[in-house]
């Protein structure tokens, strides 16, 4: 069960220049080596980080209408469930865990945030403040302010608040691109309402793509993040913010060792648009893509498995106008290589509509470059288009490709698989799948298919329709 607790130059406009390059590291004697030489172990020291950056972290309490904001007798969306084994213990201690469980979960939220400008702009998560009309911000020095919601973006889960104050402490911004897996990071926030709580851990992975989250390359960490940490900063050892703590993977609602943060460059791109217009616009390419695995890379003649494989081009979209085709593999955007397919929507989504981009693609065994002018990703077209998967039989009879283990029948939509055996069954081809193309060659009958198979050699990328979508399956002959 998955529970969702739901360009560096540009960053200097908000944050100014970064902190010391040395960071916060303490040298601790760790004994001697085999040659009796004294050695030292470098361990992170977060004390200076907390002292310097902690004042810029805020606690956020958001309510709807005249709801009781102290949470004394009201439930919270981030509160412990009443059947949690720790509920009886924590309800007497935690300031925001209700003593009398109620059913008004949607009327009270608490979370964290951090100040990004001296005049009072604050970043947090959309799910902390969404739908709330009374947002209170509590500073580290105990001052309280009513906040104005400048704008919120549900797709990135980033919201921008403003309080009426000046000369506030601000965080320093880091570059998430320089963040390394295994690097120490720390979070400051208000888990379960305990403000100014500090937790630490390491970066577990980068560029994570989560369900329904196409535009955010999440930073995965093992930092202890719990309800109430949402919207708080994730710091590197230089004392720079590299992300916004946003989501947790949990079976109980509490921390289980997997947390996700929104990279700060993605968040600041959203914040700038929210400040300027109150809304976010994202570029749209107009394609449906899939990951390039080892066998698909081999079948398309690539040396390594990277990039985004186009399985469908939206009619009338920017990609279609530029001449992109199903079977093209997008390897780079404006010269920056794509490691995984999830990199493509992230790169495109960070660019404004009307922007001209250069895509490096792999097509029919050769590298090419194609220029595309993006249009706007509106809410009405955020979901991938569906296709008509119904078929009509033709006068053609069934035919069998024994080497492939396929029995096929020609239809007006392509070659329908009637029976599967041998190597075809091993790659999860199924009865009812419709083979549309081999590589980028459309196939309508037996002759088309046999010619395409012969031209492809022993590695066959088959474009199939299954249900309402399309995908490539690599069939590798012995």
Image (cartoon, helix red, strand yellow):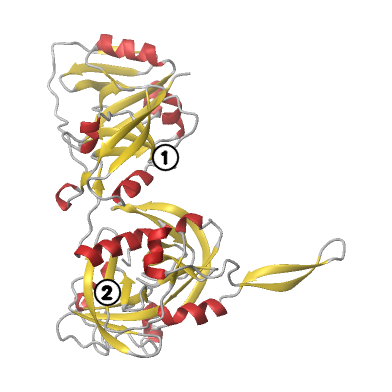
Tally the marks. 2
Disc 2 versus disc 1: nearer the observer? 1
Instruction: Identify the secondary structure beneath mark 1.
Output: loop
Q: Which mark is residue 335?
A: 1
Q: Where's residue 433, x and y in %?
A: 25, 28
Q: Quadrant of the N terminus?
A: bottom left
Which badge, 2 or 1, is on the more N-terminal residue? 2
Q: Is residue 255 left or right of residue 280?
A: right
Q: Is residue 36 left or right of residue 335?
A: right
Residue toward you, 225 or 120 = 120
Q: Where does label 2 land, which residue? A: 161
The answer to which quarter of the image holds residue 124 is: bottom left
Residue at 21 percent of width and 88 percent of height: 68
Instruction: Identify the secondary structure beneath mark 2.
Output: strand
Q: Where's residue 455, x and y in %?
A: 38, 13
The answer to which quarter of the image holds residue 310 is: top left
Q: Is residue 476 left or right of residue 411?
A: right
Q: Is residue 249 left or right of residue 128?
A: right
Q: Is 300 drawn above or below residue 136 in the view shown? A: above
Residue at 25 percent of width and 67 percent of height: 275
């Amino acid at each position: 069960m998955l529970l969702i607790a739901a360009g560096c130059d540009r960053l200097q406009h908000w944050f100014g220049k970064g902190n010391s390059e040395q960071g916060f590291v303490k040298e601790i004697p760790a004994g001697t080596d085999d040659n009796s030489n004294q050695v030292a172990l470098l361990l992170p020291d977060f004390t200076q980080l907390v002292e310097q950056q902690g004042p810029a972290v805020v606690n956020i309490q958001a309510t709807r209408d005249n709801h009781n904001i102290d949470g004394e007798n009201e439930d919270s969306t981030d509160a412990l469930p009443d059947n949690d084994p720790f509920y009886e213990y924590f309800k007497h201690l935690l300031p925001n865990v209700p003593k009398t469980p109620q059913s008004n979960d949607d009327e009270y939220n608490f979370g964290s945030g951090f100040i990004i400008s001296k005049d009072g702009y604050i970043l947090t998560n959309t799910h902390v403040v969404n739908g709330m009309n009374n947002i209170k911000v509590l500073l580290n020095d105990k001052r309280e302010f009513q906040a104005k919601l400048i704008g919120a973006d549900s797709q990135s889960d980033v919201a921008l608040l403003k309080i009426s104050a000046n000369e506030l402490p601000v965080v320093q911004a880091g570059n998430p691109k320089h963040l390394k897996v295994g690097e120490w990071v720390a979070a400051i926030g208000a888990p379960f309402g305990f403000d100014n709580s500090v937790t630490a851990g390491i970066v577990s992975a980068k560029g994570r793509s989560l369900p329904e989250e196409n535009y955010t390359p999440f930073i995965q960490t093992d930092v202890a993040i719990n309800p109430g940490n949402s919207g708080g900063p994730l710091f590197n050892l230089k004392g720079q913010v590299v992300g916004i703590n946003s989501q947790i993977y949990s079976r109980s609602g509490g921390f289980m060792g997997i947390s996700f943060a929104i990279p700060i460059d993605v968040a600041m791109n959203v914040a700038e648009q929210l400040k300027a217009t109150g809304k976010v616009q994202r570029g749209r390419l107009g394609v449906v893509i899939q990951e390039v695995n080892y066998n698909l890379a081999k079948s398309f003649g690539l040396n390594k498995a990277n990039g985004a494989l186009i399985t469908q081009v939206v009619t009338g979209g920017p990609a279609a106008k530029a001449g992109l085709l199903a079977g093209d593999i997008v390897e780079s955007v404006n010269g920056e290589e794509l490691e995984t397919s999830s990199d493509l929507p992230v790169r495109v989504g960070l660019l404004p509509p009307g922007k001209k981009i250069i895509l490096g693609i792999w097509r029919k065994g050769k590298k090419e470059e194609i220029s595309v002018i993006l249009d706007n990703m509106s809410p009405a077209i955020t979901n991938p288009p569906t296709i008509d998967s119904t078929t009509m039989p033709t006068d053609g009879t069934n035919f069998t490709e024994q080497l492939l283990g396929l029995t096929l029948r020609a239809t007006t939509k392509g070659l329908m698989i009637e029976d599967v055996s041998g190597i075809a069954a091993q790659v999860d081809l199924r009865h009812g799948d419709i083979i549309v193309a081999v590589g980028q060659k459309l196939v309508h009958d037996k002759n088309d298919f046999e010619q395409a198979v012969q031209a492809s050699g022993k590695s066959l990328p088959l474009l199939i329709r299954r249900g309402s979508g399309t995908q490539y399956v690599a069939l590798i002959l012995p």
